[in-house]
Amino acid sequence: MPSKKTPVNASAKAGAANAAGGHILCQKPGLWACFLSAFCWKRFFIQLFCVLLLLCGLHYFYSNAVENLTRQHIASGFGFLDMRAGISIPDSLIPYDSNSTYKTALLAGLVNTVFMAVLCIVAATILGFCIAFGRLSKNWLLAKLCLFYVEIFRNIPVLLVILFFYFGLMQQYLPPVRDSFVLPFHIYVNQRGLYFPALHWEGAFWGRDGLILPCLLFVFALLALFALRPAGLNISPFLRHLLKIIIGAACIAALYCFWRGFGVDMPQQGRFNIMGGGSIPPEFSALFLGLSCYSAALIAETARAGVEGVDKGLKEAAASLGMTGITTVRTIIIPLALRIIVPPLAGQYMNIAKNTSLAVAIGYSDLMRIGNTVVIQTNQAVEVVLIWIIAYLAICLLISALMNMLNHRLLFMERLG
């Protein structure tokens, strides 16, 4: 039996057509049809007005800054970057001395900032996941301790945590240099930092056995070339294992020859300082511990939410198959929970990168502290602030891009699965 068509009011049809007229007209092919649409004209003028307003604001601030700098007889521009800095950066990770330029000094601060951010991200992620699984543990005491940790660090400002580690622990309870704690393997701990034996390159290991390294590298490369052939080596299992032993021996011998090129610089305790060896300043340790412990509490809650977001039926199915708890977590829970954890985790990583700027409060030589010194010496405040903005913006955008790539990869694997 044919269905009856429901009558539609003509005025309702006309109203709907008039309301969607602009959108329908704008979707027609051709630029002229879009220009004829009142909706497109309205949107175009709004965007044009916003762009002009933004340009006018930027021009106003730029002109005002140049006028104020000229009135104070301060040169504008980035030419000061090629001038001699004269800044002391004892914990620089790149070659630097007091005769280097401001450009090198700021680059050293940027490298220290990136290095600190990477270390804190790794440490906070590992500690955060451990705390998250501790909160989900069936052990009552462990779960409550992890909950106590999260509630403490999550509700305290990160700057206060950093100041606590620096002034409350290291400067208060660590001894002076003459009373340093002496640990095994010539390790010294005092108020000036942690001192340990350090490796330094003395040159290639050449002598009567100087041909050992190139010969072993050649043998290793030759055997690896034959082993990686598509057809493989048509040999007996005994010879195949013998080749593996030879390759392993060649690698060990090559590493030994390479190791002989290094020397060990042992720290020596003096009355007022520790001479030689490597050192980690207390500012570095306080910033690392403060940021890692604070961020781990936030990452722990993110990880716990992701784990609890996994369907409990999957856990029961894994248990019914006889899988152990560790195997279930490693092969089922974590891969599925990462799809929930990764997007908010990107925000936590960017917060860690931005919070490294708090190092200026304890004197660690990061980009902010070195930039402050540059401003004091050159009065180029506007230029240094622009460098700060560009540097931190680039770091955060890079973290966001990497986390988005990881998220897309996880989603792609989910579609394949």
Image (cartoon, grey):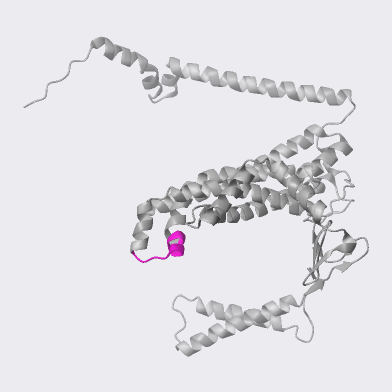
Q: Residue at x 85, y 63 (%)?
A: 180
Which residue corresponds to the image point at 77% horizontal and 22% vertical from the top-left?
63
Count of numbered circles in the view: 0
Snapshot quadrant of residue 158:
top right
In the rendering, at what x and y percent does residue 209 appear? 75, 86
- Verify whether residue 391 appears in magenta: no
Q: Is the magenta region chiefly helix, strand or loop?
A: helix
Farthest residue, direction front: 141
Q: Is residue 134 visible?
A: no
Quarter that holds the C terminus = bottom left
Does residue 53 sit above or below 137 in this rendering? above
Q: Is residue 323 magenta?
A: yes
| Residue 116, image x, y percentages | 70, 51
Query: Where does residue 219 sit, x and y in percent of width and height?
Result: 61, 82
Name the residue nearer the viewer: 388 or 227.
388
Image quarter (top left, top right, bottom left or bottom right) of the N terminus: top left
Closer to us: 195 or 136: 136
Q: Residue at x 56, y 81 (%)?
A: 223
258 sits to left or right of 103: left
* Residue that lies at the very extreme toward the right in this rendered image: 271
Seen at 86% across and 25% down, the residue is: 70
* Residue 82 shows up from this direction: yes
Residue 116 falls left or right of residue 6: right
Residue 118 is situated, as x and y percent measured from the top left of the image, at 66, 52
Residue 343, compared with residue 219, is above or below; it is above
Identify the magenta region.
Answer: 321-330
When asked about the image quadrant of residue 260, the answer is: bottom right
Up-down relation of residue 159 to residue 95 (above or below): above
Q: Quadrant of residue 246?
A: bottom right
